[in-house]
Amino acid sequence: QVQLVESGGGLVQPGGSLRLSCAASGITFSSYNMGWYRQAPGKQRELVATITSGDGTNYADSVKGRFTISRDNAKNTVYLQMNSMKPEDTGVYYCKAVLGARITYWGQGTQVTVSS
């Protein structure tokens, strides 16, 4: 059974930092491209950052220079380091695992709130 379990969300003040983790089980983690997405209230889910099985990374323009995605294949975990956070970073953050064109798994999400 495939599971993606996100953790590390919470309440942070503007300018602060959080690190999200997504622990995967039931998949050959090193073969998967991984990503972080977020969904704000009343808005569509959007891409935040992705990392390929070969460690290539891609970021949304809104988070470039502030967020860093990384992975540890030995721990079957992908991370999202979020710095200089802004209120518009608020939302539910989801982990996604993709293999090829047809296999996709999502985690349940973790809430991130940026507010003073």
Image: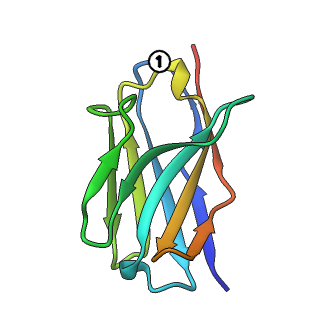
Q: Amino acid at mark 1?
A: Pro
Q: Is residue 101 left or right of residue 3?
A: left
Percent coordinates x, y for residue 77 in the rendering: 43, 68
> Residue at 63% across / 75% down in the picture?
3
Percent coordinates x, y for residue 107 in the rendering: 63, 62
Percent coordinates x, y for residue 30 in the rendering: 36, 79
Query: Which residue has dot 1 on it?
Result: 14
96 or 76: nearer the eye?
96
> Residue at 43% across / 64% down in the picture?
34
Quarter holding the N terminus is bottom right
Q: Residue 41 sits in which quadrant?
A: top right
40 or 99: nearer the eye?
99
Q: Residue 111 sits in which quadrant?
A: top right
Element type where label 1 sits in the image? loop
> Residue at 54% across / 19% down in the picture?
87
Percent coordinates x, y for residue 86 in the rendering: 47, 20
Q: Most extreme residue toward the front, as rendered?
A: 101
Q: Is residue 105 left or right of residue 41?
A: left
38 or 109: nearer the eye?
38
Q: Residue 35 sits in which quadrant?
A: bottom left
Quarter holding the C terminus is top right
Above or below for 12 versus 115: below
Above or below for 87 versus 79: above
Residue 9 can be seen in this image: no
